[in-house]
Amino acid sequence: MNDAPTSPHLFAPKLKAEVYIGVAENDGSYPPAMAERLQRSLTEAGVRYTTQTYPAAHGWMMPDFPVYDHAAAERGWGEMLALFSRTLHGGR
């Protein structure tokens, strides 16, 4: 994340949806400073969000990636499906 016009944190004020952020503990593409900036932007914009860090490497949810972690992926997909159920089906 940077100050480029397309940086994700700049879109936080426009979000109306709940957001789930599932990140890998070992992910050089999402350093702690970036995570803090995104979360601060979401909080300041009043966006409802959840973030979870998994003890895994980048790509851990993709079955065809060498770092795939079945147990962590099941938890991550479960969290995302719960979000979809709460938000896309009117809480049913």
Image (cartoon, helix red, strand yellow):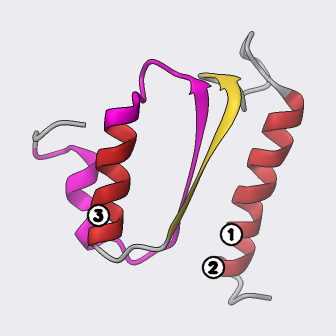
Secondary structure of the residue carrying numbered label 1? helix
**What's the amino acid at mark 3?**
Ala
Query: Residue 8, relative to residue 28: is it above or below?
Result: below
Contact, CB < 8 Å: mark 1 with mark 2? Answer: yes
Query: Residue 38, relative to residue 27: is it above or below?
Result: below
Place of residue 59 in the rendered image (x, y in percent of width and height, measured from the top left) = 64, 24
Query: Residue 47, relative to residue 29: is it above or below?
Result: below
Residue at 80% x, 88% y is 92
In the shown orientation, is residue 78 left or right of residue 15?
A: right
Disc 3 and disc 1: Cα gap in Å?
19 Å
Q: Residues within 10 Å of mark 1 (few under 14, many from 20)?
A: some
Q: Earlier in the sequence, mark 2 or mark 3?
A: 3
**What's the amino acid at mark 2?**
Thr
Place of residue 12 in the rendered image (x, y in percent of width and height, measured from the top left) = 29, 64
Contact, CB < 8 Å: mark 3 with mark 1? Answer: no
Image quarter hosting the N terminus:
top left
Picture quadrant where residue 47 is located? bottom left
Disc 2 and disc 3: Cα gap in Å?
18 Å
Picture quadrant where residue 30 is located? top left
Residue at 70% x, 24% y is 56
- Pointer 3: what residue? 12
- Pointer 2: what residue? 87
- Pointer 1: what residue? 84
Q: Which residues are magenta?
A: 5-33
**Given this view, does label 3 or label 1 mark the residue nearer the observer?**
3
Can you tell which mark lies on residue 30? none
